[in-house]
């Protein structure tokens, strides 16, 4: 795929994700569900940006896997710490 087309496609996907994130913030749902959805979209955007703009699109599968292993680990530790901390404002 041509670089220009790839960047335009990536920009459009990021714009759609951002619009969905803003829409989620206005939906009446429990705060914990909103935070989970927003974190999911944020991680998806981070992975997409790293994949395209760091040119991981052209790297081997092994290198891509090695670079994305820390992302689920960070999410896991953040969730584990959130249960340990006193975040009463999240659940309200």
Image: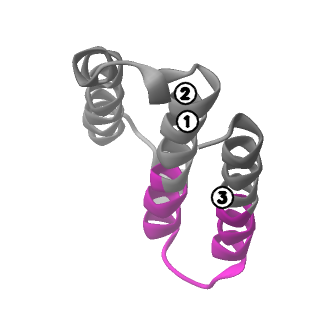
Position in image of residue 79 (x %, y %): 31, 39
In the rendered image, is residue 56 in sight? Answer: yes
**Which residues make up the magenta segment?**
16-40
Q: What is the count of numbered marks?
A: 3
> Does residue 66 belong to the magenta stretch?
no
Task: Check disc 3 and report its element: helix, strand or loop.
Answer: helix
Q: Tell me whether circle 2 and circle 3 mark residues in contact (CB < 8 Å).
A: no
Query: How far apart, in angstroms, are the residues tagged by discs 2 and 3?
Result: 14 Å
- Which residue is pictured at 33% across the width and 22% down the height? 64
Q: Which mark is residue 46?
A: 1
Q: Which mark is residue 13?
A: 3
Position in image of residue 1 (x %, y %): 59, 43
Q: Does residue 20 appear to the left or right of 83 in the view shown?
A: right
Identify whether 89 is placed above or below 50: below
Identify whether 21 is placed above or below 79: below
- Which residue is pictured at 48% across the width and 36% down the height? 47
Q: Which mark is residue 50?
A: 2
Secondary structure mainly formed by the magenta segment: helix
Residue nearer the viewer, 35 or 22 = 22
Position in image of residue 46 (x %, y %): 55, 36
Identify whether 26 is placed above or below 14: below
Give the mark, 1 or 3, whose residue is nearer the N terminus: 3
Task: Check disc 2 and report its element: helix, strand or loop.
Answer: helix
> Does residue 24 belong to the magenta stretch?
yes
Query: How far apart, in angstroms, are the residues tagged by discs 1 and 3?
Result: 12 Å
């Amino acid at each position: 795929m041509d670089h220009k087309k790839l960047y335009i496609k990536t920009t459009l996907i990021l714009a759609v994700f951002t619009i969905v994130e803003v829409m989620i913030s206005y939906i009446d749902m429990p705060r914990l569900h909103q935070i989970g959805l927003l974190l999911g979209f944020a991680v998806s955007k981070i992975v997409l940006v790293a994949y395209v703009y760091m040119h991981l699109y052209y790297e081997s599968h092994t290198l891509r896997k090695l670079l994305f292993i820390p992302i689920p680990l960070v999410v896991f530790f953040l969730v584990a710490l959130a249960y340990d901390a006193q975040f009463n404002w999240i659940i309200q």
